[in-house]
Image (spheres, rainbow, N blue to C red):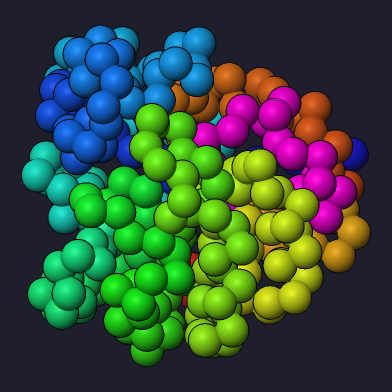
């Protein structure tokens, strides 16, 4: 059968184009040291991508409609988006299209309890269903297993929402130590009820990520920032055997990948027939608490 059509895909990492990309990504470039990152790149990891869709969308009049149009074109029913940013696109998208977008909150562990209070406000205001974390991107950086992270993990368990956390070597030219995959093991040991979803590949420790997913029931893997032809073989094999409930689709539009490229390559991924619906939809709905 292969990749099914009309399934109502859930994309667990999607966003909206911005008019000033340098301002949006300044939280990353303020801690990079190389000249390209600081002066040339509009997107901090653009050396990794042949085409950055957002660079061609800076002049669009309605960023929300632009993203929604791409979702409709490629059969994406719902998208997980960030709220709390300066642009306010996430909040406006939720107001306009509450049936199409799902709220995710970004929490900075360096803010301590104020960050936790902000998370609770956004949870109550926008119906937040997930928390996004970028350990190498925090300033200063905060490792996955740093105790500054623990109040966030505890609150997520209390609220019944998952963490989506970057793991592996980051694309931007930042130190990778905070995102070493083995650090997840301590977190899952201390928070066995936590639902933890990795983002951005876990490379070069993908096989370790698979081993840890076998070990910890709450640990999952999402495919954000990877074109389907580069999905790690270890992850595909895991999904086709014991991990059908653990691998979740995530794109990277408009940051680094077009939905057109993703969905054009997707049918060539070697998932078993029974894995496709879980990968594209039902695993995400379950993890986000929306399968009821």
Q: Is residue 265 above or below residue 135?
A: above
Q: Quadrant of the N terminus?
A: top right
Q: Residue at x 68, y 78 (%)?
A: 217
Q: Position of residue 129 (x, y in %)?
A: 37, 68
In screen coordinates, is 216 left or right of 149?
right
Toward which corner of the image does residue 223 lie, by quadrant?
A: top right
Q: Nearer the viewer, residue 187 or 66?
A: 187
Total tally of numbered discs in the picture: 0
Q: Is residue 31 above or below residue 209?
A: above
Q: Residue at x 37, y 48 (%)?
A: 136
- Residue 58 visible to the viewer: yes
Q: Residue at x 21, y 50 (%)?
A: 139
Toward which corner of the image does residue 204 lie, by quadrant?
A: top right
Q: Nearer the viewer, residue 32 or 213?
A: 32
- Residue 124 visible to the viewer: no
Q: Is residue 103 inside the magenta stretch?
A: no
Q: Nearer the viewer, residue 12 or 97?
A: 12
- The residue stretch that appears in magenta: 222-238
Q: Position of residue 235 (x, y in %)?
A: 76, 48
Q: Position of residue 4 (x, y in %)?
A: 76, 40
Q: Is residue 183 above or below residue 175?
A: below
In screen coordinates, is 223 left or right of 194?
right
Q: Residue at x 23, y 62 (%)?
A: 108
Q: Is residue 231 inside the magenta stretch?
A: yes
Toward which corner of the image does residue 124 lie, by quadrant?
A: bottom left
Q: Position of residue 191 (x, y in %)?
A: 51, 85
Q: Is residue 152 above or below residue 22?
A: below
């Amino acid at each position: 059968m292969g990749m099914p059509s009309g399934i109502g895909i859930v994309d667990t990492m999607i966003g909206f184009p911005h008019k000033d990309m340098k301002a949006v990504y300044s939280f990353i470039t303020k801690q990079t040291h190389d000249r390209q990152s600081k002066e040339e790149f509009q997107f901090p990891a653009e050396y990794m991508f042949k085409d950055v869709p957002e660079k061609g969308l800076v002049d669009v009049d309605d960023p929300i409609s632009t993203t929604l149009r791409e979702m409709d074109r490629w059969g994406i029913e719902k998208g997980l988006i960030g709220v709390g940013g300066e642009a306010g696109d996430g909040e406006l998208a939720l107001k306009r299209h509450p049936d199409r977008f799902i709220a995710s909150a970004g929490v900075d562990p360096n803010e301590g309890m104020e960050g936790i209070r902000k998370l609770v406000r956004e949870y109550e205001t926008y119906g937040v269903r997930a928390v996004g974390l970028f350990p190498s991107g925090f300033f200063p950086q905060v490792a996955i297993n740093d105790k500054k992270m623990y109040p966030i993990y505890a609150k997520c368990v209390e609220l019944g929402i998952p963490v989506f956390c970057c793991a592996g070597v980051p694309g931007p030219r930042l130190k990778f130590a905070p995102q070493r995959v083995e650090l997840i093991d301590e977190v899952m040991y201390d928070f066995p009820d936590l639902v933890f979803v990795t983002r951005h590949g876990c490379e070069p420790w993908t096989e370790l990520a698979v081993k840890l997913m076998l070990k910890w029931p709450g640990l999952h893997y999402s495919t954000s920032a990877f074109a389907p032809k580069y999905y790690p073989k270890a992850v595909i094999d895991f999904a086709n055997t014991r991990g059908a409930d653990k691998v979740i689709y995530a794109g990277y539009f408009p940051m680094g990948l077009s939905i057109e490229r993703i969905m054009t390559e997707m049918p060539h991924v070697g998932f078993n027939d029974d894995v496709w619906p879980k990968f594209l939809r039902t695993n995400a709905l379950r993890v986000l608490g929306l399968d009821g």
